[in-house]
Amino acid sequence: MRTRRKKGLLIAIGGILLLAILAPFTGWAHDFHTSITDARYNPKTQAYELSVRVFADDLEEALSRRHKTTIRLDRSERVNKLIAEYLQTHLAISTTRGIRATQKFIGAQEEADAIWLYLEIPAGKLPSGQVWVQNALLVEIFDDQTNILNLEVAGKKRSVLCRTGDTQQVIQL
């Protein structure tokens, strides 16, 4: 009887391992849709420096739908421009609600199934009181999209959660 249980357990573990190995090739590599943005105010440049982590296939899907053609993330100037435009439309940090500064897209770095996007948003003088944040990345693609934004200003760290239908938040500093 114990031998059958062990054999069944080994078969189950083998199946799980096989699924884990094959999952990246099946088109359903991840069941959750989350981005993480780390933003830091740099007093020397008077700008927010952002690092944004998204799943690469999700970003490709968003860009492809937006431009009605298949977009593959490569290092081309064309794709960088499309990414920069997408970020400008979907991500903002400002001391005034609804005001969008022109962002500077720095570049991208691939990491396994994700991609890190780097950008700067001009901010002017050191923000105090409250900061308005919009993070609508990928919400047009996934109903369950969750976007976490961590903001550091003058040593104070705050985090907000933006979701489909609730993409704007105010952070009290």
Image (spheres, rainbow, N blue to C red):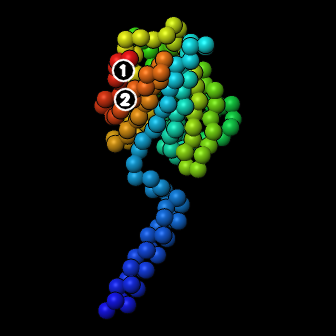
Can residue 101 be seen here? yes
Total count of labels: 2
Q: Which mark is residue 73?
A: none
- Expressed as whole percent of the image width and height from the top left, the position of residue 111 reads 60, 46
**Residue located at (62% from left, 43% from top):** 110
Who's the residue at 40% across and 35% down the image?
Answer: 147
User: Is residue 104 found left or right of 3 in the rendered image?
Assistant: right
On residue 160, the disc is 2
Which mark sits nearer the N-terminus, 2 or 1? 2
Vertical comparison of 21 with 87: above or below: below
Q: Compared with residue 171, is residue 95 higher up or lower down, i.e. above or below? A: above
**Which quadrant would residue 85 be assigned to in this image?**
top right
Q: SS at mark 1? A: strand
Q: How far separated are the C-alphas under marks 2 and 1?
A: 7 Å
Residue of label 1: 171
Q: Is residue 135 visible?
A: no
Going by the numbered disc 2, the residue's amino acid type is Val
Q: Quadrant of residue 163?
A: top left
Estimate the x, y position of residue 160 in percent, counting from the top left: 37, 29
Q: Residue furthest top?
A: 125
Q: Nearer the viewer, residue 127 or 122?
A: 127
Residue extending farthest to the front is: 155
Q: Quadrant of the C terminus?
A: top left
- Residue drawn at 52 percent across, 19 percent down: 41
Query: Label 1 amino acid?
Result: Ile
**Marks 2,1: beta carbons within 8 A:** yes
State left or right for residue 106 relative to residue 68: right
